[in-house]
Image (tube, helix red, strand yellow):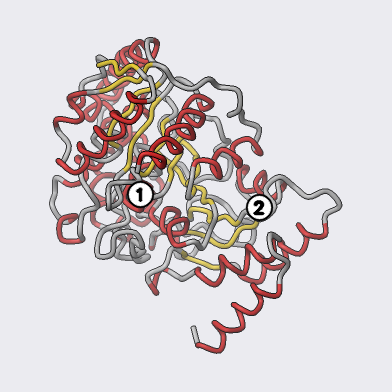
Amino acid sequence: MSAARRRDRDADADAAPPGSAEAAVERALARARLVEDGGAYAAIMASEARRSALAVEAATVKPPLRGFTVGVKDLLAVRGQPIGAGSAVRSEAVPEPRDAAIVASLRACGAVVVGRTTLHEFAFGVTGLNLHAGTPANPSAPGCIPGGSSSGSAVAVASGSARVAVGTDTGGSIRIPAALCGVVGFKPAHDTYPAGGVLPLAPSLDTVGLLGADVQDVATVHEALGGRVEGHPPPTRIGVVRAGLEGADAAVAGAVEDALTTVSRRGCELVDVAWPDADAIHAASTTIMFAEAAASHRDAMAASLDAYGDDVRERLEIGASITDAEYAAADRERARLTDVATSALDGVDCVIGPTVGVPPPTGEQAADSGIAARLVAHTRLANLARLPALSLPAPCAGQPIGLQLTASTDRAVLSIARWLERELALAC
């Protein structure tokens, strides 16, 4: 962008009334960059965003999300835009005639869409690396991967080009990039937000969710969409999974231990919980995810297999080889693991642990074949058991490290996360 154009944008932001939707949009657009320039976006919808902001300000009654700018993962329909899904397979996709259900609801509440955020191809990967569409730069950990699959949504929030962003989470795809980019990532209970207008990956695991700079913004959006947060009591019993801490990098384990020390000092009892076995979680979720993904992509694979990126094509081919008997066995294991998790949560207000067991990996480290398993080691259970979970930045860690909260209800997760965010900030 030229210096003159940048000055014009800054002048537009200054000219808009403070606190208005127009000012919020101009601030977001001034920070928005396409992925080819290291930014979060597959497409920036500047003209439409400005028109939408004017309409919000013209409304007789100010809507609840006035001043909220939104990035939408390029897996969801945005009217007038194609769904690119970060893939050459979708290079001929036509513009969508209508918004995905959650996008329509956000607009109805006064939020303004800034653009479509990029992602790991077809949301089938957790590094965020995408050779076709490009990989957004991590603004909170330069030189490190953004995480995936909702890479652009996390980068949009971290860069200030969107106040909140919509993502999808099939095995950690909201929480992982949130942790690596230092923002809040909320995976609600399965089906809290409608999946209409979202390209499916693994439907029994796919969950639409939100990313934001802080818990309050995410909670505000959740309530505008019909959820509840207020009125939940502060936690008194916090569950801890010791095996997860023992397997984490020292910096990550230290950040989680610091958070647990803080809540203990605030009067919470720390309770070691019997959490499902990590290897069993990984095996069951991989079988279910890969088989369902292959089914979702069966027609496209038959027509355009060579257009897929190498990593996604390999996973889809593995999924296509999974038998009905293997899937059924994994589904039975899912039920067993869900029972273990819900039983553990019955005795505590929530479980706190690492979101990701390692600090943000560099691009070179992300080339290691084992990195994906480490990135998802703590996130997949919530998808299997359809439980809500949230990644909260550890404020004193000195680098992006996420604390994961898992609870029985969306209301509990958001309420406890808001309380914990406040307490940790005071402790720094």
Residue type, mark 2 in image: Ala
Which corner quadrant of the image does residue 282 belong to? top left
Q: Identity of the amino acid at label 1?
A: Pro
Q: Nearer the viewer, residue 152 or 19?
A: 19
Lateral position of residue 153 relative to residue 294, left or right = right
Say if residue 202 shows up in the picture. Answer: no
Q: Is residue 222 left or right of residue 342?
A: right
Marks 1 and 2 sit apart, C-alpha to C-alpha, by 23 Å
**Residue at 31%, 46% in the rendered image:** 396
The answer to whether residue 174 is above or below residue 56 is above
- Residue at (51% x, 51% y) in the render: 165
Secondary element type, mark 1: helix
Q: Is residue 23 above or below residue 355?
A: below
Q: Give x and y (percent) for residue 229.
A: 58, 29
Neighbour tally class for label 2: few under 14, some 14-19, many 20 plus, Cα within 10 Å:
many
Which of the 4 image quadrants contains residue 44? bottom right
Image coordinates of residue 87 in percent, x first then y, are: 39, 59
Q: Nearer the viewer, residue 280 or 399?
A: 399
Question: Which residue is the extreme one toward the right?
Answer: 60
> Which labelled disc corresponds to residue 111?
2
Numbered badge on residue 35: none
Residue 415 image position (x, y, % from top left): 51, 29
Q: Is residue 132 above or below residue 423?
A: below
Mark with earlier residue (1, 2): 2
Q: Is residue 112 visible?
A: yes
What residue is pinned by disc 1?
Answer: 177
